[in-house]
Every structure is written in structure tokens, then in C-alpha cells.
Amino acid sequence: MNTTKKWAANVRKVTPYVPGEQPQQKNIIKLNTNENPYPPSPRVFEAHQNMDVSRFTLYPELSAASLTAALAEYHGISNKEVFVGVGSDDVLSLAFLTFFNSRKPVLFPDITYSFYPVWAEVYRIPYECPALREDFTIDPEDYKGENGGVVIANPNAPTSISMAASQVEEILQANPEVVVIIDEAYVDFGGETVLPLIQKYDNLLVVQTFSKSRSLAGMRIGYAFGNDKLIKYLNDAKYSFNSYTMNTVTIAMGVEAVRDEAYFRETIDKVVVTREWTKGELRRLGFVFQDSKSNFIFASHPKYPAKELFEALKQEGIYVRYFAKPRIDNYLRISIGTDGEMKALIAFLDKYVGENL
């Protein structure tokens, strides 16, 4: 007797998030997942080499206390205003679960980080997606109606466009009764953080990550800043299903990454300089895009379909990101690599454009 349909009726079915490709072969240029092209701080390497493996018999710090303290000290806030999780995805997912429990729809843009609707579906959260303007900017007026919460990536992904802190505050002022989450995964590359506003708005949660500007995507470290009550509620949710989300090695490496400010600034400056050079070269080749304040460029060419460019680049061993979605299916998201990697990209595009005139 086939009983599959009976148990399947009670399964929570979702359409999962699809991450960018992670090709493992060597000798490729990987510009598709917004990783930092430079290695982590030398202090991170030292922490790894000096790790006392006998500590692995013990559970890690319950609240990632040393990393929480390092982040609090770095940003000049209280330890109670910092939450640490396994990558910003983990932090954001927990925030959705914790703060969005009304019957009113949560608001986030129609073009943004594609994990947002996935979490909403998983947790059965109603949501609406106000459309970005034609130039892909966010209209604050779209977030002033009745809602169950607001989530905005700033700079936005995949568009790379940054909102001014004053515009974010305008949205906060219109939403005193719900939690407003600002996802700042890319803010270090030229955006304007709203971290100072957590002292003014007790409903603001600011989420950041070590994956981009601190070159630790593989270690999975995300964190949030907010009012101490917001952070307590996040911790309560975390401890309700997994007390030890951060491992000992990751905590130690994260602390050293935070403490090496000089290296942090050096690598960011390198990425920004390369980004600005790449912008100029792409414009020369006829690409169009909004001004990027992140570590990637979201570009389109009026003569060459993005899907064809994506496939041609992949054949050459150059991986960028393509989204087969409404409004953005003629755009490529190009992560900023090293100078050499971006020169190779431009050299290929130079040749491709020349051969396809």
C-alpha cells in the first residue's frame, strides 16, 4: 500500500534558495559570489597555527563571548547590543523567526536578496514586495504603510545601490511599532551604516558579516547590532534549538580579524580602487549600471544579452552571476576580484565585443 501521499500532506514544502555556483576546479576566475579576493588577516593565520587542539574536547563559548566583546569594543557599544551567529544568513533567518509574527505583511523590495522570500515562506510569514523604481532605487514612501516589519539590504543586492542613512531613518520614523532590519553585508565598501541609529530607535536591527570585507566567507560569521531587548529575544530563539552555534576555531579567528584594523582597511581600499577602474572599463565597452557602493557591479549591455555573455564568460573559465528573473534578466552581477582577475575579465569582454559588432 502506497502511503506517500498521507505523510507528504504534512510536509513543509518550500522553494529553496539557490546560491551561486561554487566551482572547485583550478585556474578559473571566480567573480560570482561576492567573496573577497584577498586572504584573511595574517593574525587570523596566526590564530589558526597557534590553536590549542586540546580545547576541542570542550564545548565552545556559549555566547561567543570573546567575539561578541571584540565587536562591541570595536564599534563602541555594549556587549548586550551584539548578537553573533553562523553567517549573516543564520542571523537574518533567526531575526525573521523572532520578530515577524503578526498577520501583517513584512515588506522588502521586489529585487533584493533572494533569501528573504524563502525565509518568509519557511516561517509562514506574509510578505509584500514593493517594486524598486526604474533605476533600481528604493522609494521610502513604499515602506510607510501598515506592515508587520521591514527588511532592506543596504547596499542592496544584486543592484549594488546604497541608500543614505537619512532615507533609512525616514523609514524608521514611519514604523515605530515593528522591527526594521537593515542588512549591511556590503556596507564597508562605500555605503553608509545606520549602526549609530540603534541608540535612537529600539526597533532597529543592523546585520553585518565577516564574509565580504573581512575575507572569512568560509568561516561563517555574521552578527547583529540592536537594542539589548532585541538581542535578548534573538538569543532566546537561538538557545531554543542550538546553544552552541559558533565553534571554537571560528570564534578565535573572528576575534583576530576584528583586531587587525590596518589590514581590514588595506583590503577594502584595494577592492574599491579595483572597482572604480572596472567601472571605467565597463563603461568604455558600452555597459550600463548604477553607481556601485559594494564589492560588485550590476551591469547590462544594450547590444549583448546577459545570458549569452554569462555563457561565453563561463566557457572562458570566468564565473559571474546571472539571474533569470523579471526586470533583471539582462544584467550580470560581477564581483570585484584582484587587479589581475578584473583585467582578464575586461580583456575577454574587449575581444567579445570586438568580434560581435
Image (cartoon, rainbow, N blue to C red):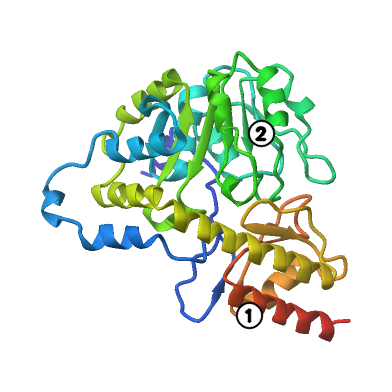
Between residue 16 and residue 158, name the one nearer to us.
Answer: 158
Amino acid at pointer 2? Phe
Task: Return the residue found at the far front.
Answer: 262
Q: Residue at x 69, y 59 (%)?
A: 297
Q: Which numbered disc, 2 or 1, marks the residue that appears first in the sequence?
A: 2
Residue 151: image quadrant is top right
Residue 41: image x %, image y %?
Answer: 39, 60
Quote the CA–CA distance across marks 2 and 1.
35 Å
Q: With 77 as the anchor, is 168 left or right in this view?
A: right
> Quick check: 136 above or below 334?
above
Q: Position of residue 191 (x, y in %)?
A: 64, 44
Q: Is 332 located above or below residue 169 in the figure?
A: below
Mark 2, secondary structure of its residue: loop
Q: Which label was assigned to residue 315?
A: 1
Residue type at the position of mark 1:
Gln
- The residue that disc 2 covers is 108
Instruction: Name the residue nearer the viewer: 319 or 261.
Output: 261
Relative depth, front residue between 341 and 69: 69
Percent position of residue 183, x then y: 57, 38
Q: Is residue 57 visible?
A: yes
Q: Is residue 356 above or below residue 331?
A: below
